[in-house]
Amino acid sequence: MTSPSKATAVTALAPEALQSWFKEHQDLVVIDVRSAAEFESMHIRGSYNVPLPLLSEHTDELAARLGSRVVLVCQSGVRAEQARQRMATVGIDTAYVLTGGVPGFAAAGGDMVEGKDRWDLERQVRLAAGSLVMLGLAGGKLVSPKVRMLAGAIGTGLAFSAATNTCAMGKALSAMPWNKAAKEPTRESAILQLPVHAADEDAAA
C-alpha cells in the first residue's frame, strides 16, 4: 500500500484497511479523541487517547510529534472529523477518519481492549436531549405553555450543533463526574507519550 501524500485529499478509512495498516506500517499512529471514560470502556488496541478538548488545546505540540500516517477515531466519526479539521490548521492534512468509529472497528473483528461498561457520550446526549424535549412538552401542558420553550430551545440547539458540527451538550456532559476516568489524560500523559515520527518517515518506508 502506498503512503498518503501531502497532496492527497483527506479520506475516510475503512476498519478493514486499518487492520491491515496495523500489520504493515510501524509508523502508524491511531489517536482516539473520545473522553477518557469512553476510552476506558473500550478502545482499539494500540491507540492513544487524546480527548478532543486536549487535542484542540495542544494541536501544535501534537502535530510536531506525528508523521504522515495518522488515523483519528471516536464513537461515530463526528469528533474525529472535528479533530481532523483542527489538525489541518497546523499542517497535518493527511489524517484519516475511521469509518464507523470504534464500534465499527470492533464489529469488523478488530483487536479491542475492553474495560468498564459505560454509555458513550453521544448516547448520553441523545438521552438528555430527548428527556428535555419531553419535559418541555409535558410541562407546557401541565404547568405553563411557556415551558414548551424548553423543547424549542433544545431543537434550536440540535440544529445549531448539526450546522456547526459541534456539541455544547456533549461538552457539558463530558464534565460530569460519571464521565471522568480514574486518571484523566494530561499534556504529559497523552501528548508527550506519543512516539515521535518525522514527517518523511512514510516516504522512506
Image (cartoon, helix red, strand yellow):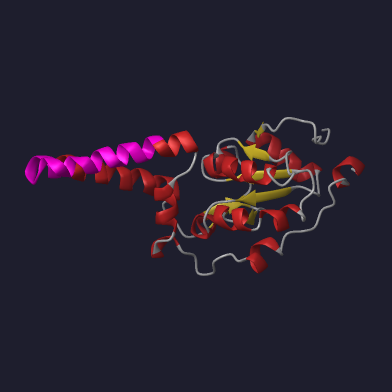
* Stretch of the chain drawn in magenta: 138-159
One can see residue 106 in this view = no
Residue at the limit of the structure toward the left, as seen here = 142
Q: Is residue 116 left or right of residue 97?
A: left
Note whether 84 is above or below 41 in the view shown. above
Q: Is residue 62 left or right of residue 35?
A: right
Quarter where residue 189 is shown? bottom right
Q: Position of residue 81 (x, y in %)?
A: 59, 40
Q: Position of residue 137 (x, y in %)?
A: 17, 39
Q: Is residue 194 left or right of residue 75?
A: right
Note whether 115 is above or below 13 in the view shown. below
Q: Is residue 94 left or right of residue 121?
A: right
Camera-nearest residue between 139 and 19:
139
Secondary structure predominantly adopted by residues drawn in magenta: helix
Residue at the location (26% across, 45% down)? Answer: 131
The quadrant of the picture occupied by the N terminus is top right
Residue at the location (59% across, 58% down)? Answer: 54
Quarter where residue 7 is shown? top right
Q: Position of residue 190 (x, y in %)?
A: 65, 62
* Residue 19 drawn in magenta: no
Q: Position of residue 166 (x, y in %)?
A: 48, 43
The quadrant of the picture occupied by the C terminus is top right
Q: How many marks?
A: 0
Note whether 62 is above or below 106 in the view shown. below
One can see residue 90 in this view = yes
* Residue 146 drawn in magenta: yes
